[in-house]
Every structure is written in C-alpha cells, then in structure tokens.
Amino acid sequence: MSWRRLPPRLRHGLVVLGILSAACIGGPWLANDPTTIVEPAQAGLLPPGSSRWVVELRDGSRTAADTAQRTQAGWVLSGRGEPRTIPTGAVVKVQRQIFWLGTDSLGRDVLARLLWGGRVSLAVGLVALLVAVVVGTSLGLLAGWRGGLVDGALMRLADALLATPALFLLLMVAAIFRPSLTLLVLMLGGLSWMGVARLVRGQVLSLKEREFVLAARGIGASPLRIAVVHLLPNTLTPLSQDAALRLGDLILAEASLSFLGFGVAPPLPSWGGMVAEGGEVLGTAWWLIVMPGVAVTAVVIAAALLADGLGEVARQEGVP
Amino acid sequence: MGRWLLRRLAAAVLIVWLVATATFFLVALAPGDTTQRLADTRVSPHIREQWRRTFGLDRPVVTRYAQWIAGAVRGDLSTSWTTYRPVATMIGEALPNTMFLAGAGLLLELLGGVAIALRQARRPFGAGDRALTLATLAAFAMPTFWVALLLAEVFSFRLQLFPASHMHSPAGELARGWARLLDLAHHAVLPVLAMGLTGVGAIARYVRGSLLDERGQAYVLAARARGCSVRRALRVHALPNALLPLITVLGLSLPILVSGSLVIEVVFSWPGMGQLVYSAALARDVPTLMGGTLVITIAVVLGNLMADVAYALLDPRVRLGGGA
C-alpha cells in the first residue's frame, strides 16, 4: 500500500512519532549537555527563551551572566547580585547560550534534558512492548493450540493479572527489588502481556480448524511450524493495532512510576521524573511541569492515532 | 442466575487467591533478605536478627505462606513494619477515602463523557465533533500525575481557589455536620477533577462510537420519521442502548481507575489506599504493601462482578444459567 492511500490517522501518528523519535535520537547532539550544571544562583529556574553568557571556568564549573566584559582586571560579569570580576586565567570559554525551554532549579537546560529523557522513556517503552509482545504471543499460541489445562491455567493467570491494578503491583515489585533499567523494562513488559496473549489465543482458536491449517497438519507440519508460518501472519494486523495502544500505556506507566520515584533513577533524566522535579518547586516554574507532560501526551496521542489507523487498515482487509 | 453467580464468584475467589499467592512468593523469593531492605546497613546484625524473629521471617517459607493465607481469610493481614499497627486497621481507614475519590471521579467522568458524546453524535464529522474528538483524545493521553500537578499549580498556587492537600483543614477536622462536609467538598474538588479529566476521554470516545452505531439503526430512523428531534432521538432512544455495553467497559477499566487514584492521592496527600501503599513502598513496609495490593485487587474484582450482575439484570436478552 502506498503512503498516500494509508488512513490519515495512521499517517499522522507515524509522522508525530517519527519527528519525536528523530528529535530524541538526534537532538542530544544539537542541544546543550543535559548534565551540565550552570551555577544555580545565576542560571537556576530561567524561563523559556532566556539567554545568558555562560562562562566555563578552569575548575570545570560553569557560571552565567547577563553581560560579560573583558577588562584589564579580567572578566566582569553582571547578573543576579553584585557584578563579579574573574581573572582571565581562570576562564576557559565564554559563550552566549539560549535556553529554549528554560532551566531547572539546578541550572540544567530543560530542552536537553527533555530530549535525553525522551530517549530513555521511548526506549523503555519500546523494549517493554517487545517483551510483552514476545511473551504474550508465545503464551497465546501455546494456550490456543494446546487448549485444555494449559489454556485454563494461562487464561486464569491472565485474568488475575488483568484484575490487579498495574501501578500497585509495579510499586510493590519496584519497592522490593529496587529495579535497574533492565529490570524495569522486564517488569513493565512482564505485566502487560495478558492482552496480547488473549488476542493471539482468540485468533488461533478461530483459525485452528480452518482448511489451510488442517492441510498443514495433514502433510505433517510440526506445531511450531504451523504456529510461526500459518497462524502468526494472520494475527499480525490486530496485533499491531493492539501493540500501538499498548505502547502508549507502557510509556504512561513508566512515566507514572518514574514520577513516583520508583522508575528510571535520577541521574538519568526521564519525562516522569522531570515532572516530579517540577512538582517540588510548584507555583514558581510552570515550564518544568508543562514541557515533559506535553511530550508524554504527544507520544500517547500519536500511539492512539496509529492504533486507530491500523484498525481501519484491518477493517479494509476484512479482518474482524 | 444462582448457578451462574456461584460460578462467577468461584472464579473471583480463584483470582484473588492467585494474586495473594503471587504477591507472597514475589516477596518471599526476592533476592537478599527483606529485613536488610527494611533496615539501614548501619543497624547491628544482632538487632536485625531480632527483627527477623519479630516479623516471623525465621520460619520456613511454606509455614509463612500458610499463615499469610489463613490470616488473610480471617481478615488478619499481619502488622505493619513501620507503624506496628494491624495492616487491616490501616486499610480500614484508607479504603473508604479511596472509594469516595474513585466513586466521585467515576461519576464525573461518566456524566461528562456521556454529555460530550451526545453533543458529538448530534452532528457527526462536523466541526464540533472533530474538535471534541481531538480534545477527548488529548484527555485520554494525558498522564494522570501531570493533570493533577497542573490543577494544583493553577487552582491552588496561582489562583488560590482550592486547597491542594489532605481531606480536611485542621479546623474542618474538628468541625461537625455541614461545616465538616463543606470542608471535605472544598478539599475534594481538585482530586476529583483530576480523576474526571483523565477518565472522561476514554468514556466519551467509547460512547460516541456506540451512539453512532445506534444512530444508523432502524428504530432511531423510525423515531426520526415520527417527527422526533435528533437530540431527543439520541437521548431517549439511542442512549440507553449505547450505555449498556459501557457497563462492561467500566468494570474492566476499574484497575486503571484505581491506578489513577494512586497517583492523585500521592499528589494531593489524600489519605487513601494509594497513599498508604506509596508510603509503604518508600519505607519497604512489606506487610502493608502486600495487604494493600491484595485488598485493592479484591475491590476491583468485586467491582467487576457487580458490573457483570448489573449487565445481566439490565439487559433482558441475557439469560443466565439455562441455554447458551
């Protein structure tokens, strides 16, 4: 199918996701360094669009000023408080820097942190989705194909996990294990395979008795071959629709967990964690809360549009 | 009906037992010693050994599992590691607050969602419908904690209209009757609004879809042919049929509702289950974590069961027990 003939929602979702991922992948080279702290007394909590002279000192620290002038005595910096004079020898570099989305209370660039946080949030969401899809597909195929006791046990387990509020369970696991990034991904994926498994199982049950599967069995194909070659391709469209919605859920779950302080650990920026940091200075710096939240919302909207569009494709193909 | 209900009840009990078992073994099989997590490493090994005995961690896993299940059945969820109070008592205090918050939020999102969907279905694919579709999609996509913080920032810190923490002010805590209720309502505005705002999108999207399906049905056309206005045809004829499947959807969305209330309770310091479990997670208070998760799961499973029963009672086509 050509790009133009795809449902508009699908195209919009793909474009938004593409732009955001491109920004997050390529952005960190364009934006300032997210870990750089510019002396908070001078550059902390700057509103979006501010610019300052950033002075890099020989000891590795950075300070900022509204104006920087080179005189006989050294660099004269005037900013918040009294003007300061720094000997020329102590200064490595002086450059004008624009903070497009402002700075946080430690004097770090919000745009840079947003892009780096996006890398973390998107990567965690995507890998967790991969885990959920692999686990869910395998268990769904197994349950649908074997039936009987295996099916009953797996589906009751899925029911139990679906009935438990995910955030409570995640919080409990996170509190006990103090998760690393890997464990966080496994945890998120491990708690969201149920929907995939149910979907795949349903498809397998409806396809199992169809002629092409019976024919494959008749000529002696192994169950694994039938599952991979004959059943899986037929579940692809509904599965991708489900996966798109699930990506949004996973990114929201990761953000909630990081917001609560049990997800991505602090030196690494994440969108949820950034909102939490903004919440600590509530009422003073709106941009700290607004920016990462907008980023999460944009990704989830794009994922939902993608899912809607894929659903439309499925209807066009005649898959129920 | 009786036999069907019994089977559904048995399934619910099975689910609760599975969750209780899974949470227990998750904790029991965690690498390292739970008391080590409870305590600072600076605590002497002697004291830690004492803790192990107090919390019953010196007994074998199977014994502890049997005790946990037997206790849970009797309503005894053992003692908190931080407050040394019975977990069941702490939950007894927190659960009504969560149910109040979740109930009020659910009501708000239901009313709002249905109102929006009715407005959209009047002229589907018109400008108003398109704008509202975008708005409900955004509401559906916004993270709950973010909405809660934004509400606190705008209405509490900037406009100073509503308080952003706790259920009562100190004065309201002491007041009686209407004054106390008014104080509670004042504190509940922002948390309930946060719940409603994040849930309204999903409901509006769902109801709009089923209203559009009903709109094409012959009985709606017949009503229109009799001279019924579009609004009346939608509200009186199509809406009841469109709302019926919503009951099941609501039942299934309860876990999401409760997860949302966790975050909102943390943001607004609302003394409910979410706050309880969150502070237990911070303190690594294992019994409270396990008990809280179990009880909130039971509440969700019961809610699901109620949704199923309500659906069966309201839809005359559903015949339970006999036949299919």
Image (cartoon, coloured by chain):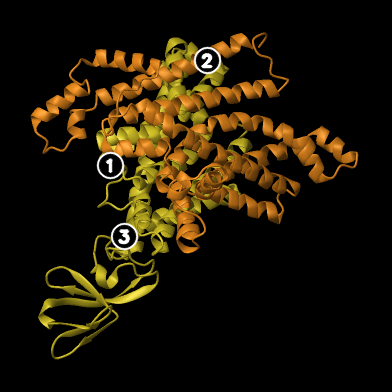
Chain colours: A yellow, B orange
Which mark, by number, is residue B9? 2
The location of residue A218, given as percent across then percent down, is 49, 11
User: Which residue is disc 1 drawn over?
Assistant: A181
User: Which residue is disc 3 drawn over?
Assistant: A28
- Quadrant for the N terminus of chain A, please: top right
| Distance of label 2 from label 3 (alpha carbons) | 54 Å
Q: Residues within 10 Å of mark 2 (few under 14, many from 20)?
A: some
Q: Amino acid at mark 3?
A: Pro
Q: Is residue A222 above or below residue B236?
A: above
Q: Residues within 10 Å of mark 1 (few under 14, many from 20)?
A: some
Mark nearest the camera among 3 and 1 is: 1
- Quadrant for the C terminus of chain A, please: top right
- Most foreground residue, A8 or A172: A172
| Distance of label 3 from label 1 (alpha carbons) | 20 Å
Circle nearer the N terminus (3, 1): 3
Mark nearest the camera among 1 and 2 is: 2
Which mark, by number, is residue A304? none
Q: Amino acid at mark 1?
A: Leu
